[in-house]
Image (tube, grey):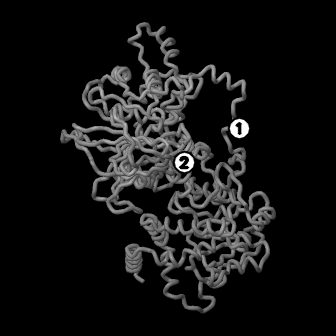
Amino acid sequence: MSSKINGQVSPQPCPHLVDFRSRNGSKPFRALQDCIRVKPPGGRAAIRREPSEVPRCSTCEESSRPRLYACVACAAVSCHAPPLHSHASAHALSIPGHEIAVDVDRAEIFCCACRDQVYDRDFDAAVVLAQTITATATTSTSGSTAMQCNVTGSQPENLRKRRRVDYRPWAPDSREHVIIGNHSIPLHDATNASLISSTELPWGLRGLNNLGNTCFMNSVLQALLHTPPLRDYFLSDRHNRYYCQQKNGAINGTKNSRLCLACDMDAMFSAVFSGDRTPYSPAKFLYSWWQHAANLASYEQQDAHEFFISMLDGIHEKVEKDKRKSQSPGSGDCCIAHRIFSGILRSDVMCLACGFTSTTYDPCVDFSLDFEPNQGGSGKSSSAKSHNSCSVEVDCMGSNQNCGISTLKSCLERFTRAERLGSDQKFFCQKCQVRQESLKQMSIRKLPLVSCFHVKRFEHSSIRKMSRKVDRYLQFPFSLDMAPYLSSSILRSRFGNRIFPFDGDDQDASNELSSEFELFAVVTHTGRLDAGHYVTYLRLSNQWYKCDDAWITRVNESIVRAAQGYMMFYVQKMLYYKASEKQDAS
Amino acid sequence: MKHSVNRPPTPDGAEDQGKEPTLQEIINIKLIESGEKERLMELLRERLIECGWKDEMKALCRAYIKKKGRNNVTMDDLVHLITPKGRASIPDSIKTELLQRISSFLTSAAL
């Protein structure tokens, strides 16, 4: 009984609504538009004939009923308080054509005959419009001119911006079998059987030797080696190191000056997935990375997150940029690193004086979480979002959780909650042309393929010239649904029960891909800030493996749950295979 | 609301019928006129979300809809379902806070 438009389920209208629309021409709710009042600016919408009207039921005079409905046909206000009485239903039954009413306090349409809420796109469009535009209608006597808009024009019925290709399963025919056989090396080759000694271990598990305090690098590399889209990219030869060397070697001259982190990654993928189980030494990679991040080149211990960011940067820089593709930040068209990790954040700042909202989009490659100071107060400070990582605050006294335990979810909830920028953080409102107190809300416009959550455990205070490590435990789920933090969800909760797509936004971007994520790697840190150790836990075929430099052991999931997470990697569920990853079906 | 349709007259409050407005009604009108009711509603909404009450009600509705089938449930059914539970599960702290706000409003409005 409902159709899918734009990825959102759109309920079918009841027969009374259909009837009403057909009887009342192209703009059946036009008269209601004059009565939409939005208080405070940008907040909830209500229906009032005059701004200070106190709605009353015309039958029983009550104004304090929880639900009052105004008949759209004749403007009679009736109460609806089942099971005692519903004067709204009585009204609908007594006069045919008067079944459709609108909730005066919520601006939502109700069918009194069906006794159920119904949805109408034109009406919702009008309400959303009223909520988003500023109150300029006060200057004109016929305020309706500002409100009336050609809603049919602004809603594209062709809602799929990217053409979807139908999925067709493929299996090779005999000729293709031969081609495949001739041009590939089988993974389970009989001659290599000796190398694949422990066949119960998944493919691609190989220890990494510590080359001198390089556990920070090994841990991140293990996570990246098993990042499904990255693994697939390199294993399907999308960056061929020989070809790349050949091409760039000619340009740059000396072989030593040629540096390509992607080529080194390619070499590492080949080595790790070769089937050889002896620990691998990523010396070439380390050397290349030193050349790229000269300031970090030493045998001292480094920060794993810093390494991660600098590595993505390195891949981005050196991968040949396709000039034809758009270079818009966050689109991920520039390189594989951004294609996988880059998401887009949306920031809405709404002036509390006039309701004008300014929206900005910023790309990010991961989410950095802060531990809130232990007082549990409501003081939140959001730092500038222009960095690559965005800061998110952990709430240890949050709502639906045990006292004192911080969770990843509560943190994200806090991140997307509307926050009042107080008098010391006034934002310049373009409409008012002065600095005003505002309401700021963050949301995720586009989810990356892989979300990396980084917990800020290392505090560096330049004032006190000291650094310390925060050992506090953070609970993280194995499956994470990011839907409540998407812009579409946040906006929907701001505007109420509407089916109007907002701003002509590319809703498709987040709706086409799933918002469900699966955890596949956890980088943990134990010990002190200056003397600590990084270890990575990998989830393969729903088994957890501890990767401690050159030693890989299978561990129970409870160990992972209790671990002190420093970086958590989640991949979109549709890219993550739980059951079918096992190579040998037993 | 076409202009050509005869609209029933807006009732003149209770004076027509000779009914004395109850205290509850007077308070309600004062709250609405001053805008305090809206502020209280916003505060209540915020508190109920914070303490997880909204999520609980949502979960109840979901479970009910799952059981009955999406097309067999009306809004009235849901309201009927969660009203008693909802009313009973509001935390005392929220009740106290709102009552306090209302009473201070009443003293300031010199009722």
| In the rendered image, the vertical position of residue A364 relative to residue A443, given as above or below | above
Front in this rendered view, residue A309 or A521: A521
Query: Left or right: A297 with respect to A558?
Result: left
Q: Are labels 2 and 1 assigned to the same chain?
A: yes
Can the viewer see residue A334? Answer: no
Structural distance between the alpha carbons of marks 2 and 1: 24 Å
Residue underneath mark 1: A168
Instruction: Tell me the quadrant of the picture where the C terminus of chain A can be found.
Output: top right
Front in this rendered view, residue A495 or A27: A495
Q: Which chain is indicated by disc 2?
A: A
Q: Can you give x and y, in whole percent of width and height, for residue A179 in the image?
A: 67, 22
Q: Can you give x and y, in whole percent of width and height, for residue A530 in the image?
A: 22, 37
Can the viewer see residue A246? Answer: yes
Q: Secondary structure at mark 1?
A: loop
Q: Which chain is indicated by disc 1?
A: A
Q: Can you give x and y, in whole percent of width and height, for residue A220 in the image?
A: 38, 34
Residue A515: mark:
2
